[in-house]
């Protein structure tokens, strides 16, 4: 299930956009205190994928299954440490995860923007940003 | 006469070039018309296309679009039909009055047919020359739904009584915003509970029971993704990846994927292995690997080596190590056992030379042991670091309170043993076949599959060591089982389908009684859950909560720490004078004495789940617990504090408590030990405490 370069870029771009939409929906349902399955599902997806997806923008992963698995475990791992940190610090504010979500969404947006610039411009930017496009150009495995 | 070759040519050729029908002979020569219409021809793709005769011409009955769908029918039809049959069968499943054989006897024939269809469809999908990954994914999801979503869909509340203890910790964190390490062991390893509390709050669910029922499906699905990804990374084979995930689903009978730190950390552990397999793999042989290779060569006459092209490994080393450490830290703060088994596994991969850098296990050990040190005294005092160094003793799963279980339980235990040994046996065949073809990856996966055995050399883990050994070996066994049934050439053909279907079918057949065989004990009636919730919300703080028998969903509430005992369960049957005999009015004074010896304010619970557990596990004869309840209710020494169809909570009257106290004092003054106190507190019984608290599971499960 490893995708060729261009399709890998499409997959990552697609998942990034979908995750941003999910994060927006989750933030709206939490902010407006809406109750129902939509809130549960959007929050679950955001909690299980958003931080991991943000981390994975820094490294190339072309295998969809691996991406999904890694994004999930990294999200759960980071979430666990943050939640434990709040317990240890005697500062229990689950709403603070909203800030984490915002940060992760920012990383995804920046990655998307850099990828877009890289496609338009003659040279891809150096560094971790625009990983999806570096994958497409064959720089990464 | 028409030959098959002619027919084939006929269909493949352009319609304009088709010979007239008379060249094929009149329809009467080839039999009656319906038979002609049912005749099929084989196309180049290997699929059968039906043809018919109309106005004397042979032409395909279906248009091209429909013909393109035909090859999908053998693989997709069982999937769609199976899922539909399963969905239709659900409303016929009644989970009340289950026998000691659990759920299987009440599952409708449609449910079994659905599973049979899925087995056949999965076998066909696996054996196709060209594998279709998304179809494999669909089958993995379908098996997960049928096997793990059936109970949540037909039962009113999350199954397993110990789930409610975990929910109690989540609610405690939600209520207090902190943990108190003096309460119980969960508060010392709070990672999973803290994240669950965050999710519960953000999802707007004040009661986590709303989502806990689906944990088993959720964790199993993530497990399959990770196992498939690891297999895909190791073997670069999509078919092996899908098959390994599928085999894991149908062999994971141990029921550890419920709402628990174990299920959560198992997922994270697989994530660590995925990173190690992808980013830290090395083809350089170490001395140990060279010895293993040499031994394999000596025995099997095959040169064994790791592939020259190790998996990707494109991440910066520092990033990779950081992520591994982050995940290990998350596991370490969430579970007592998983980090050590992970450490053993990573160390093994480093020793055989697959994982580099070789110092990675040292870094992980610092994290893991660093967290244990401040908790060492607590663990040692309450459970012991090493329960026994005798592996044969540690693998025994003693029956609860030494009861003689009913035949259904013995049968389920036999099938589960057969399933585990079957999976291990097939895995051994897989190792052998990989080594025979010189594939050194067997020397990485094989040791990982048996690495969890190390547990039984130091811990019985509350009688659950063997369950954890099985759980931690299954992902690797699943990969190896695939190579046990895969063709040696790697070229899959449909003639292998019967073997694959038989193997999958046998594993599924053993899985059903192994996994569903405890359902009569595991299903929690919703009114019992409500009773527990009410008790912890409205009971008098500081009171003793005691069940008549094990299996009531205790500690379900954010205030569970205000009751006694907070770190374990107490039942009347902890006292062996109440076990193995009929109970009745003559036992009430002993019950009162026992309760009063613990506390002046006591809640005594009688519930359907308790009666079921006591009778099915052979702790009391049938009818003993209901008889005792009747005696308690009519004794005048208890008042009914809460009542529902499946649960009654009685409160010891102050007068009865005072009278029992006086009687006990008088007996003590006379130098005797009162009956009902001789075999006292379950809270101080280390074996009992270990069995119910550290593992959250009773010793028989």
Image (tube, coloured by chain):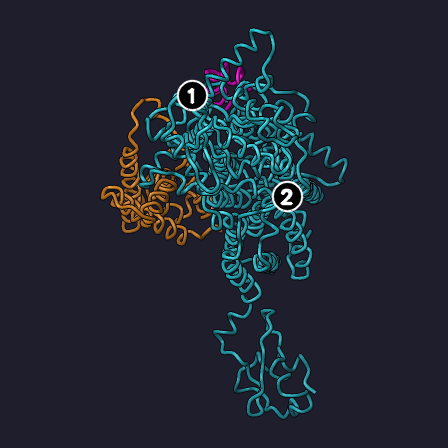
Secondary structure mostly seen in the magenta stretch = helix
Instruction: Give left or right: position of B171 versus B404.
Output: left
Residue B52 or residue B218, whichever sits in front = B218
Per the image, label 1 sits on a secondary structure element best described as: helix
Q: Which mark is residue B654?
A: 1
Q: How far from the left and from the top, in percent, is residue A21?
A: 29, 49
Instruction: In the picture, one chain is orange; tell me its letter.
Output: A
Q: Which mark is residue B570?
A: none
Residue B405 or residue B459, whichever sits in front = B405
Mark 1 residue crowding within 10 angstroms, few (<14) / some (14–19) / many (20+): some
Per the image, label 2 sits on a secondary structure element best described as: helix
B118 is higher (above) or lower (below) than B674: below
- The residue sitting at 58% across, 47% down in the picture is B98
- The residue sitting at 67% across, 91% down in the picture is B28
Q: State whether residue B609 appears in this view.
A: yes
In this view, the residue farthest toward the left is A32
The shade of chain B is cyan
- The residue sitting at 65% across, 47% down in the picture is B510
Q: Does mark 1 fall on the same chain as mark 2?
A: yes
Q: State whether residue A123 appears in this view.
A: no
- Is residue B593 highlighted in magenta? no
B47 is higher (above) or lower (below) than B538: below
Rounded to the nearest angstrom, the CA distance separating label 2 from label 1 is 63 Å
Mark 2 residue crowding within 10 angstroms, few (<14) / some (14–19) / many (20+): many
- Is residue B383 highlighted in magenta? yes
Circle 1 marks a residue in which chain? B
Q: Which mark is residue B480?
A: 2
Circle 2 marks a residue in which chain? B
Magenta-drawn segment: B364-384
């Amino acid at each position: 299930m490893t995708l060729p370069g261009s399709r890998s870029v499409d997959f990552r771009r697609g998942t990034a956009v979908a995750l941003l939409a999910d994060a927006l929906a989750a933030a709206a349902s939490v902010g407006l205190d809406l109750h129902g399955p939509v809130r549960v599902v959007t929050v679950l997806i955001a909690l299980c994928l958003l931080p991991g997806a943000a981390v994975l923008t820094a490294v190339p992963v072309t295998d969809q299954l691996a991406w999904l698995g890694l994004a999930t475990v990294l999200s759960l791992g980071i979430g666990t440490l943050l939640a434990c940190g709040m317990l240890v610090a005697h500062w229990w504010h689950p709403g603070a995860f909203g800030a984490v979500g915002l940060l992760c969404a920012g990383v995804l947006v920046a990655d998307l923007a850099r990828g877009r610039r890289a496609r338009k411009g003659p040279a891809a930017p150096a560094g971790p940003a625009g990983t999806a496009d570096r994958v497409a150009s064959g720089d990464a495995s | 006469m028409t030959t098959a070759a002619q027919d084939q040519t006929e269909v493949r050729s352009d319609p304009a070039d088709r010979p007239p029908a008379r060249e094929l002979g009149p329809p009467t020569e080839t039999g009656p018309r319906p038979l002609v219409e049912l005749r099929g021809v084989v196309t180049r793709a290997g699929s059968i296309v039906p043809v018919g005769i109309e106005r004397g011409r042979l032409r395909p009955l279906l248009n091209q679009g429909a013909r393109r769908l035909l090859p999908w029918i053998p693989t997709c039809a069982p999937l769609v039909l199976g899922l539909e049959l399963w969905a239709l069968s659900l409303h016929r499943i009644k989970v009340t009055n289950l026998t000691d054989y659990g759920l299987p006897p009440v599952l409708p024939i449609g449910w079994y047919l659905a599973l049979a269809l899925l087995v056949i469809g999965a076998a066909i999908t696996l054996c196709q020359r060209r594998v279709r990954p998304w179809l494999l994914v669909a089958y993995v999801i379908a098996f997960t739904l049928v096997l793990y979503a059936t109970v949540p869909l037909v039962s009113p509340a999350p199954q397993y009584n110990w789930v409610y203890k975990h929910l109690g910790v989540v609610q405690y964190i939600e209520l207090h915003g902190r943990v108190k390490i003096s309460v119980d062991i969960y508060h010392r390893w709070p990672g999973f509970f803290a994240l669950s509390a965050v999710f519960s709050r953000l999802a707007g669910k004040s009661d986590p029971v709303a989502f806990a029922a689906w944990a088993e499906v959720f964790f199993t699905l993530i497990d399959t993704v990770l196992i498939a990804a690891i297999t895909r990374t190791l073997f670069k084979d999509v078919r092996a990846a899908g098959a390994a995930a599928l085999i894991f689903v149908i062999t994971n009978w141990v029921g550890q994927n419920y709402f628990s730190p174990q299920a959560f950390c198992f997922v994270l552990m697989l994530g660590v292995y995925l990173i190690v397999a992808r980013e830290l793999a090395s083809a350089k042989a170490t001395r140990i690997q060279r010895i293993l290779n040499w031994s394999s060569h000596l025995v099997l006459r095959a040169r064994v080596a790791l592939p020259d092209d190790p998996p990707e490994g494109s991440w910066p080393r520092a990033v990779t190590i950081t992520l591994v450490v982050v995940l290990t830290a998350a596991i370490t703060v969430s579970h007592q056992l998983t980090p050590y088994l992970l450490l053993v596994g990573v160390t093994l991969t480093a020793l055989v030379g697959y994982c580099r850098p070789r110092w990675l296990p040292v870094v992980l050990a610092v994290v893991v042991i660093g967290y244990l040190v401040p908790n060492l005294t607590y663990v040692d005092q309450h459970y012991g670091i090493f329960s026994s160094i005798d592996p044969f003793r540690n693998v025994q799963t003693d029956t609860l309170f030494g009861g003689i279980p009913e035949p259904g339980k013995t049968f389920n235990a036999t099938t589960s043993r057969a399933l585990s040994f079957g999976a291990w046996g097939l895995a051994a065949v897989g190792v052998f076949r990989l080594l025979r073809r010189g594939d050194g990856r067997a020397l990485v996966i094989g040791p990982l599959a048996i690495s969890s055995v190390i547990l039984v050399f130091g811990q019985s883990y509350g009688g659950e060591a063997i369950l954890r050994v099985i759980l931690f070996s299954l992902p690797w066994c699943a990969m190896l089982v695939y190579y046990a049934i895969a063709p040696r050439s790697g070229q899959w053909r449909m003639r292998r389908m019967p073997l694959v279907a038989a193997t999958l079918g046998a594993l599924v057949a053993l899985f059903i009684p192994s996994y569903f065989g405890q359902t009569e004990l595991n299903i929690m009636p919703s009114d019992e859950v409500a009773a527990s919730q009410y008790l912890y919300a409205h009971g008098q703080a500081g009171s003793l909560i005691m069940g008549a028998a094990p299996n009531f969903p205790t500690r379900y509430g954010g205030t569970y720490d205000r009751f006694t005992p907070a770190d374990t369960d107490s039942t009347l049957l902890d006292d062996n004078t109440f076990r193995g005999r009929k109970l009745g009015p003559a036992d009430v004074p002993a019950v009162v004495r026992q309760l009063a010896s613990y506390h002046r304010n006591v809640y005594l619970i009688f519930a359907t789940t308790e009666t079921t557990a006591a009778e099915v596990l052979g702790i009391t004869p049938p009818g003993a617990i209901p008889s005792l309840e009747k005696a308690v209710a009519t004794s005048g020494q208890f008042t009914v504090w809460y009542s529902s169809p499946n649960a009654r909570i009685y409160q010891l009257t102050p007068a009865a408590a005072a009278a029992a106290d006086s009687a006990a004092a008088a007996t003590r003054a006379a130098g005797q030990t009162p009956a009902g106190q001789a075999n006292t507190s379950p809270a101080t019984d280390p074996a009992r405490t270990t069995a119910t608290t550290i593992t959250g599971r009773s010793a028989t499960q």
